[in-house]
């Protein structure tokens, strides 16, 4: 019993290390740099006026530094428990953290300052890949802890597909970094490749990862009707078809598949049907189910904007709006909702510091995202000049929201725990 408690405490500390690291990436190399880029773009009223290396540094820090680090930490903590696997050695989690963190920092610096980038960029990609392989073998290759192995439920298949999406992103990243180091004059992915690579790392990795955990946890947290397993697998098939066709450059077909996949995933998880049970919202703000539903509306908006962008010739503003509808409207809103629901208890049975702050930050994030997506289309596409003035406002609102999210989690972690047992089964069964 004592050993089980000690293991649980070490796991919580490991998870907290990942979450704190993710928060740092989110705040400075990610959001602060994004805001800086947007303010410069707006003051010059030209999207192409800043260095693509800085834009790519921001994108990599957000996707891999923030969201990726959160996913690795939550994966280490939860997947072996949910799958009832034999525990992994904690040093594997620590080495993975070290390799991943150094890799992402090195990548950010080699984009921001070209000092020895020909060595640092490929090396950073190797470190990220090594971290992933350690993670994968730790959480995926351990045999079940006694008894008959649990069959693979559809949600786990979706998480596996997302994990393969992450592996594909890291391999593409490594290949592109080596290619740049050998042949290019600057540490910047060519625009065409970058667009296709981003489809893999957003729709191929983040989107199915959120669907997988939504199917497992949100059905319980929101009291939804039972999951439609067959629909979920169809959604995964459509999404995968969208990612593959998008990567090979058939953007219209890809957009149709991705939008259809998102609609089918929503039908599978049954977000917009009347709930079967009351939502489990103890210790968080009661608006939780509303914001989760709004996040899924943003997923559809992202898909629809992607379709619009693919149908017209020059559409940088619509592509950018689609990307941020997905990354801020869907991914960040989901992390704000589900993160504040599960992380306090996973990180040592704590209680979220402020449910009101949770509401405020979600309102700010959705407001900032709405202003950003609308004014990016109007400004970048030359539809309305006044929209250039709205973009910096949207950026500051989003920055305030993410800063509040970090503060709420940091204060929560600094406060003493309430109980000392594992929360996972209690919360999800
Ligand atoms: C919170 C405020 C944010 C601001 C102010 C911001 C700003 C920007 C700007 C100015 C660009 C350049 C392209 C464009 O204008 O559309 C960009 C690109 C990008 N952003 Fe953000 N962003 C924010 C949040 C996020 C988040 C939360 C994510 C992901 C989780 C993200 C991921 C990306 C990606 C992947 C790119 C494309 C990078 C590339 O072209 O390789 N951003 N962002």
Image (cartoon, rainbow, N blue to C red):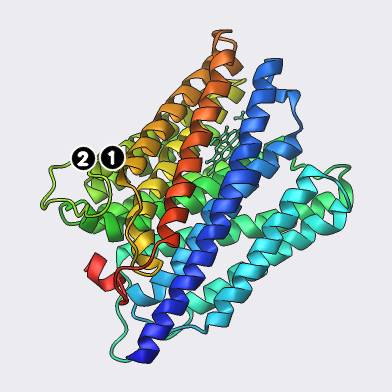
Left or right, 179 with respect to 324, comes to right
**Label at residue 13:** none
How far separated are the C-alphas under marks 1 and 2?
Answer: 7 Å
Q: Percent position (x, y) of residue 414? A: 45, 61
Crowd class of label 2 (few under 14; some 14 to 19; many from 20; radius 10 Å): few
Name the N-terminal-most of marks 1 and 2.
2
Q: Percent position (x, y) of residue 142? A: 46, 83
Tell me if residue 248 can be seen.
no
**Label at residue 272:** 2
Of discs 1 and 2, which sits in the foreground? 1
Q: Percent position (x, y) of residue 179? A: 81, 52
Of 282 and 334, the residue lying toward us: 282
For the residue labelled by badge 2, is the local secondary structure a helix, a strand or a loop?
loop
Total marks in image:
2
At 81% across and 45% down in the image, what residue appears?
Answer: 187
Q: Quadrant of ligand 1?
A: top right
Q: Percent position (x, y) of residue 426? A: 23, 70
Crowd class of label 1 (few under 14; some 14 to 19; many from 20; radius 10 Å): some
For the residue labelled by badge 1, is the local secondary structure a helix, a strand or a loop?
helix
Q: Which residue is mark 1?
A: 293
Q: Are marks 1 and 2 in contact (CB under 8 Å)?
A: yes
């Amino acid at each position: 019993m004592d050993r089980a408690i000690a293991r649980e405490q070490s796991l919580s500390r490991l998870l907290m290390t990942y979450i704190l690291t993710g928060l740092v990436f989110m705040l400075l190399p990610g959001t602060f740099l994004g805001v800086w880029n947007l303010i410069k773009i707006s003051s010059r009223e030209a999207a192409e006026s800043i260095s693509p290396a800085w834009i790519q540094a921001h994108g990599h820090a957000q996707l891999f530094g923030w969201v990726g680090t959160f996913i690795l930490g939550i994966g280490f903590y939860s997947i072996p428990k949910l799958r009832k696997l034999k525990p992994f050695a904690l040093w594997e989690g620590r080495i993975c953290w070290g390799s991943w963190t150094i890799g992402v920092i090195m990548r950010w610096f080699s984009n921001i300052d070209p000092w020895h980038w020909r060595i640092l960029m490929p090396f950073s990609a190797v470190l990220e890949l090594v971290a992933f392989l350690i993670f994968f073998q730790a959480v995926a290759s351990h045999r079940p802890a006694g008894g008959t192995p649990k069959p693979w439920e559809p949600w786990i298949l979706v998480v596996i597909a997302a994990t393969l999406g992450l592996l594909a992103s890291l391999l593409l990243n490594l290949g592109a970094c080596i290619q740049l180091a050998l042949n290019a004059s600057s540490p910047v992915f060519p625009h065409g490749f970058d667009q296709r690579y981003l489809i893999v790392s957003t729709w191929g990795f983040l989107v199915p990862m959120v669907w997988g955990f939504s199917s497992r946890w949100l059905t319980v947290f929101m009291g939804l009707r039972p999951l439609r397993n067959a629909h979920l697998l169809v959604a995964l098939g459509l999404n995968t078809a969208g990612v593959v066709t998008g990567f090979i450059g058939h953007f219209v077909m890809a957009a149709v598949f991705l939008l259809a996949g998102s609609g089918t995933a929503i039908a599978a998880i049954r977000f917009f049907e009347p709930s079967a049970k009351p939502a489990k919202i103890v210790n968080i703000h009661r608006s939780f189910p509303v914001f989760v539903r709004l996040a899924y509306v943003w997923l559809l908006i992202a898909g629809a904007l992607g379709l619009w962008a693919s149908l017209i010739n020059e559409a940088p503003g619509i592509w950018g709006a689609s990307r941020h509808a997905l990354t801020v409207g869907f991914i960040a809103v989901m992390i704000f909702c589900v993160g504040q629901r599960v992380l306090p208890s996973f990180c040592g049975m704590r209680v979220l510091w402020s449910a009101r702050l949770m509401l405020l930050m979600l309102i700010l994030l959705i407001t900032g995202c709405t202003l950003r997506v609308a004014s990016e289309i109007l400004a970048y596409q030359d539809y309305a000049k006044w929209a250039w003035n709205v973009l910096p406002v949207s950026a500051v609102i989003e920055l305030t929201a993410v800063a509040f999210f970090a503060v709420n989690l940091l204060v929560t972690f600094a406060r003493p725990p309430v109980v000392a047992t594992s929360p996972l089964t209690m919360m999800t069964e």
